[in-house]
Amino acid sequence: MRAMVLREFNTPLILDGEMKTPRPGPCDVLIRVKACGICRTDLKISKGLYKPEVTLPHVLGHEFSGVVEQIGSDVRGVEIGQPAVAYFYITCGKCRYCLSGEENVCSEMTRPGFEQFGGFAEYVAMPAASLVPLGEGISFEQAAVLPDAVAVPYHAISRLGKLERGESILIVGVGGLGVHAIQIAKVLGAQVIAADVDEGRLEIARGLGADQVVNARDTDRVDRIRSLTEGYGVDMCVDLVGTPISYNWALDATRKGGRYVVVGYAANQPLAVDTVPFHLNEWKLIGCRGSTKQDLIDAVDLTRRGLIKPIIDKVYQLEQANEGMQDLEAGKILGRGVLQI
Ligand SMILES: [Zn+2]
Ligand SMILES: [Zn+2]
């Protein structure tokens, strides 16, 4: 099969036309990959920031859709030719997290594109249980955007933050996840305030339904957000940046008792918790990792019903993966860049 292979960290991927096609085990399916999203995590992996989980040579790509090409001997209820999107956390199914619907923090998990070869390739073998069937009306490219750029903000806003109709939410960072977070929060009936440092992105946020936008570089950003929320601050903030640059002001724009969900992350950039304001304000600081499988099912459903529109900025062919990664790194991609395979 054809795959784009990472042979050395910090070097471009190389097209290999003769990679071994994976063989599905008894409980697995072989997926003919049709589209795969390009994620900032792929950039981090290619730079060697996910050692030791990621070993070389490696095939990137954890956000992919395709059709079922082969079925393992013990698999039931899956048809050859079924279009599907992959839930990319392959979990143990036995631990207390898996059993309580928190499989996104299963300690035994492996992931295509991390510990295993991923979707920058024609085929991936994975457990049949990882598939989420695609209904009518969702293209493979749109589906490839769902596992990360839609399901993750959905997990943050709906499952973790429990956003309620009529509440106010501040979304910090109008990037690949932010453009979908805005749509999700609107569907859930919230007053949506979007913040970013880039005026062009704020314009896009308005177009996607944000009720108000705030330039994160403005010195009066916190006062503005308070003035938009009757002086209180927002009920909930979703921080898609996750560094002191966002946290150091956006927490202050969150009301007393409000929820602050940290989705973005960066090594060696700790967020300071001064216990006095936390005590006085009863803020709830919440971490967020990926999504549950049910979140992905919900993301597929919201898309199928036309309530969320996956934002695809650019489509590349498999052999253009390096170009796609460079465009993402250079800030040229708004929603998602997607490989067509
Ligand atoms: Zn991703
Ligand atoms: Zn588990």
Image (cartoon, grey):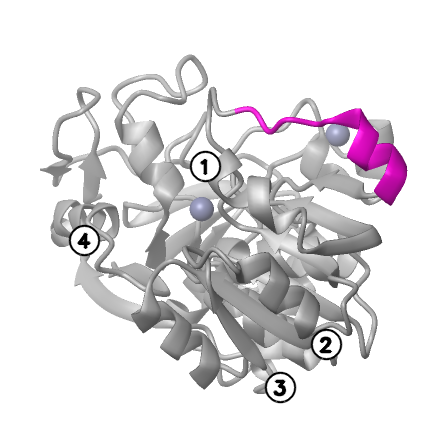
Look at label 2 and name its amino acid.
Answer: Ala
Looking at marks 3 and 1 on the same chain, the residue that comes earlier in the sequence is marked by 1
Q: Are marks 2 and 4 in contact (CB under 8 Å)?
A: no
Look at label 3 and name its amino acid.
Answer: Arg
Q: Specify the quadrant of the image occupied by residue 135.
A: bottom right
The location of residue 245, given as percent across then percent down, is 47, 40
User: CA gap, disc 3 to disc 1?
Assistant: 28 Å
Residue positioned 39% across, 21% down in the render: 54
- Mark 4: which secondary structure? helix
Residue positioned 13% across, 50% down in the render: 323
Q: Specify the quadrant of the image occupied by residue 14.
A: top left
Q: Which mark is residue 327?
A: 4
Which is more foreground, mark 4 or mark 3?
Answer: 4
Looking at marks 4 and 3 on the same chain, the residue that comes earlier in the sequence is marked by 3
Relative to 336, 277 lies left or right: right
Q: Which residue is mark 2?
A: 190
Q: Which residue is mark 3?
A: 305
Look at label 1 and name its amino acid.
Answer: Pro
Residue positioned 73% across, 72% down in the render: 229
Q: Which residue is mark 1?
A: 112
Graded by Cα atoms within 10 Å as few (under 14), some (14 to 19) or many (20 or more), the crowding at tag 2 reads many
Graded by Cα atoms within 10 Å as few (under 14), some (14 to 19) or many (20 or more), the crowding at tag 4 reads some
Per the rendered image, the range of residues in magenta is 270-281
User: CA gap, disc 1 to disc 4?
Assistant: 23 Å
The location of residue 306, given as percent across then percent down, is 57, 87
